[in-house]
Image: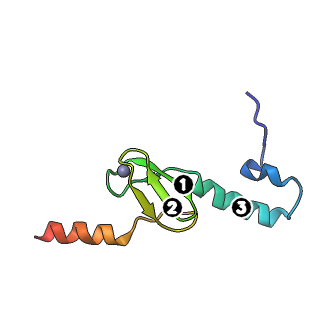
């Protein structure tokens, strides 16, 4: 199978427009946004971006709020887990 987009990747729809710096920036953000993240609840790589700042786990069906494109586990979850461990 031949690769349709050689180096432009997910920014192929932009064509030659917007300049290389902008296209590379979009590609960087896209590659992070489209990847799987570790679920803070069931610790599997099943969390995907479903919308701006919204991430959902395909295994336990939980939805998390995070950055618009990057997933950072909510700190409140870790705080709760830590207090439960110390009890
Ligand atoms: Zn999960």
Which residue: 83% across, 55% down? 14
Q: Residue furthest top?
A: 1
Name the secondary structure under disc 1.
Answer: strand
Which mark, residue 50? 1
Q: Quadrant of the N terminus?
A: top right
Residue 59 x, y percent position in the rendering: 38, 44
Q: CA distance from mark 2 to mark 1?
A: 6 Å
Q: Residue visible at 43% across and 61% down?
A: 64
Do labels 2 and 1 touch, CB within 8 Å?
yes
Name the residue that disc number 3 marks: 26
Classify mark 2: residues with Cα within 10 Å, few (<14), some (14-19) or many (20+).
Answer: some
Between disc 2 and disc 3, whose residue precedes?
3
Kind of element beneath mark 2: strand
Is 57 located above or below residue 4 in the figure? below
The quadrant holding residue 29 is bottom right
Of callouts 1 and 3, the N-terminal one: 3
Q: CA distance from mark 2 to mark 3?
A: 19 Å
Using the image, determine if residue 34 lies above or below residue 22.
above
Q: Nearer the viewer, residue 47 or 61?
A: 61
Quickly name the residue at label 2.
Answer: 54
């Amino acid at each position: 199978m031949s690769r349709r987009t050689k180096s432009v990747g997910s920014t192929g729809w932009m064509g030659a427009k917007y300049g290389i710096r902008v296209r590379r920036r979009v590609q960087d953000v896209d590659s992070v946004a489209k990847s799987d993240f570790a679920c803070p609840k069931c610790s599997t790589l099943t969390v995907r971006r479903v919308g701006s700042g919204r991430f959902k786990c395909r295994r336990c069906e939980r939805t998390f709020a995070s950055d618009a494109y990057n997933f950072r586990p909510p700190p409140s979850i870790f705080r709760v887990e830590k207090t439960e461990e110390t009890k």
